[in-house]
Amino acid sequence: MKLWVKIFLLNVLLVLCLGILVGLAIRNMVFVTLRDELGRQGISIAGNFADRIAVSTLLEDRYDVEEAARELTVTEKDIEYIFVTNQDGRLFFHTFPNGHPPDLLAWNPVSQVPGPSVRLLTTEKGLLWDVGVRIFEGMIPEVHIGISEEHLARRLTQLRLIVIAIMAVVTMIGCALSYGVSRHVTKPLATLVQFTKTLSRGEFGQQVRVHARDEVGELAVTFNTLSVNLRDNREKTEETYRQLLQTEKLTALGRLAAGLAHEIRNPLTSIKALFQAFRNDPRLTKEDIEVVLVAVNQMDELVGKFLGFARSDNFHSTDLYLNPLLKQVLSLVQFQLRKQEIEPVLDLTKLPPVKGDRAMIRQALLNLVMNAAEAMPSGGQLTLVSRVIDDEMVEIAVRDSGAGIPEKIRDKVFDPFFTTKPEGTGLGLGIVYNIAQLHNGSVSFASTATGTTFFLRLPLQS
Ligand code: ADP
Ligand code: MG
């Protein structure tokens, strides 16, 4: 549940509880006040009436008392009955139309103490207030007036409606205010939450706009600082990384240049020596020419390798049968294998032709096989496996029983110029990677301490 909904519901609950409590309190207060008022009114009416009929009572002038009672009931609508007792304490006058109740005099006898007596009676007509006063102080005659609470009940019903209406309005206003407040309080928080999502997406440097001068505002300022710091740090890291990469590249280039120089120097030295000799004795033998040719070939091959790595525009796609190609590659290195006492094993499955550049694929396979051979300086087993992966891919695996690729250089072996061999150029696997990419294929490896397998995957239709 969202925070603002929680705050809102809590506030609504509070407003409702408060409203009900306040409503009940008001109702009770008004009820008590009204009853008091009713009692006081009753006493004053009864008093006035007693004064009015005092003489008539003494004279037992029933007619006049009746007249006075009629006048009173006309003006005071809530009067239910009137009765008067005479000097003997017996009923002298009453307004009950169908005879008076038998225990009438016992309802609310006025005590000997001076002052009126007010009592609440429960009758079949509902609650009645009987107000009794003595007509002459210290004498027996009494006047009793019965006042119904109907008026009071009507007022109370009215009052209840008003209180309910007020409560409804107050509750509604409370709810609206609470909604506004909870939204107002949680909106900056929601903005902040949104902002943290932006940050977590890595969009550093952005700023959040929260104009609150409270904890949320402070939080926003902190977040903004954090955002800027994160951006600066990232920029610094990237800059450092760029510099590192640059250094790495330069180092690699240096190493390549050294490698190339080293490779070229040997054939160059033999050519130079030959030509120096040629200056003294201008006769060239056939062997001399052969030496020059071998040296020039060596250099040409080296340059060709380098160019092969750098350029990929001479791509000639044909239907290639990989199994014969594997055999061809193996025959190219057979002398080397024999010299190192490496046993070649072929594990070939019938393959459909793949679309690819023959020279490139042969180069890639040769590089993998050469690496495998170089990984087994004191002999071992070289296995070439071909298999169909699915309708779209075939795979060549080149497995050796060498010492494996150490864990910490595994992510570097495909980097151009990366080598662990004193005579290595570090271009072999880089070239394989390039060729695999050009054919929409892939190259990967698995390595343990007992050997390494390189997998070259090629699509049937590139
Ligand atoms: P180079 O052979 O000139 O060193 P490569 O790109 O062919 O360059 O190989 C890079 C490095 O990967 C090698 O120096 C070697 O450390 C490692 N490597 C490649 N193939 C194997 C293998 N079959 N077994 C062990 N290490 C290997
Ligand atoms: Mg190599």
Image (spheres, rainbow, N blue to C red):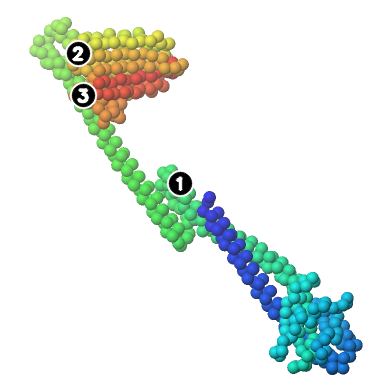
Q: Within 8 Å: ligand 1 and the Cβ of disc 3? A: yes
* Circles 1 and 3 in contact, beta carbons < 8 Å: no
- Between marks 2 and 3, how big is the CA–CA gap? 17 Å
Residue at image mark 3: 421
189 shown above or below 51? above
Whether residue 72 is visible here, answered yes or no, is no
Residue closer to the observer: 173 or 288: 173
Residue at image mark 2: 340
- Name the N-terminal-most of marks 2 and 3: 2
Q: Is residue 262 left or right of residue 348?
A: left
At 48% from the left and 49% from the top, the residue drawn is 194
At 87% from the left and 77% from the top, the residue drawn is 99
Question: Helix, strand, or loop for circle 3?
Answer: loop
Residue at image mark 1: 197
Image location (x, y in percent) of residue 366:
29, 15
Residue type at mark 3: give it.
Lys
Residue type at mark 1: give it.
Lys
Image location (x, y in percent) of residue 2:
53, 51
Q: Quadrant of the C terminus?
A: top left
